[in-house]
Image (cartoon, coloured by chain):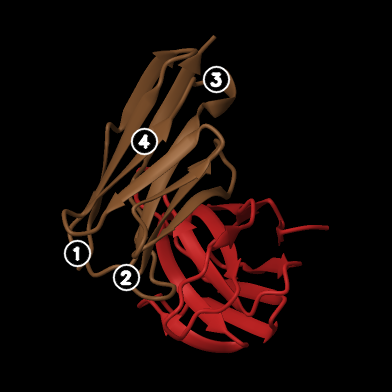
Chain colours: A brown, B red
Amino acid sequence: KQEVTQIPAALSVPEGENLVLNCSFTDSAIYNLQWFRQDPGKGLTSLLLIQSSQREQTSGRLNASLDKSSGRSTLYIAASQPGDSATYLCAPGGGTYKYIFGTGTRLKVLA
Amino acid sequence: ETGVTQTPRHLVMGMTNKKSLKCEQHLGHNAMYWYKQSAKKPLELMFVYNFKEQTENNSVPSRFSPECPNSSHLFLHLHTLQPEDSALYLCASSQEAGGTDSYEQYFGPGTRLTVT
């Protein structure tokens, strides 16, 4: 059974810092991995989708890497801004739709 | 309307009530999903529909009854719920939910359900 761990559980940083959010998963037989952000009381917004054959994906200030064999993914956020404050969730996809979610990293970027 | 919409956004219901949650996607997708998000627990997949056919029921109690009349609409019918069913219910869609390709999921804003 896939288990997903996200570290740290919470993070508070001053504006402008570069950040690293970590995701580890126990079953490396995945098709892809998706990173989401969730604002309080809201739905999830897809940030990046990495296919199992890829090593990384970039979108603006965000870069996600995937090391399937070691069961790890990392989300880098460059030059953090207060608007980046949210909970970040990773979800490895064990089948075409069987995404298993972690409990997230709650990020607060201070102005 | 764009993306995935959900109504109502908030719902308070008693344990003997019957209510329904509605989800609509405007993305031309063929797969739709219901997820449950409880406080301090990971998001849990409840149901999956692919081309209007249910392909996954993740051991969900029968007091939750999904309905997918077409690829754009998904309902979750609720009856005789328990207080522990209080949660954020999220709907999502993707291009498909089958085969060997994997597709990005797009989520709605959720319905915050409180059972009293």
**Residue that badge 2 annotates:** A94
**Residue underneath mark 1:** A27
Mark 1 and 2 residues: CB-CB less than 8 Å, in contact?
yes
Amino acid at circle 4:
Thr
* Residue at the image position 72 percent from the left and 59 percent from the top: B3
Q: Earlier in the sequence, mark 3 or mark 1?
A: 1
Q: Secondary structure at mark 2?
A: loop
Relative to B34, B72 lies left or right: right
Query: Any mark on residue A105, and which?
Result: 4
Q: Earlier in the sequence, mark 2 or mark 4?
A: 2
The quarter in which the N terminus of chain B is drawn is bottom right
Q: Which residue is mark 3?
A: A81
Q: Label 4, secondary structure: give it.
A: strand
Residue A71 numbered tag: none
Q: Position of residue B18 (x, y in %)?
A: 63, 71
Image: B6 above or below B100: above
Task: Identify residue type, mark 1.
Answer: Asp
Judged by depth in the image, the label closer to the viewer, 2 or 4, is: 2
Q: Chain of mark 4?
A: A
At 34% from the left and 53% from the top, the residue drawn is A55
Amino acid beneath label 2:
Gly
Q: CA distance from mark 2 to mark 4?
A: 21 Å
Question: Mark 3 to mark 4: distance in Å?
Answer: 16 Å
- B53 or A28: which is nearer to us? A28
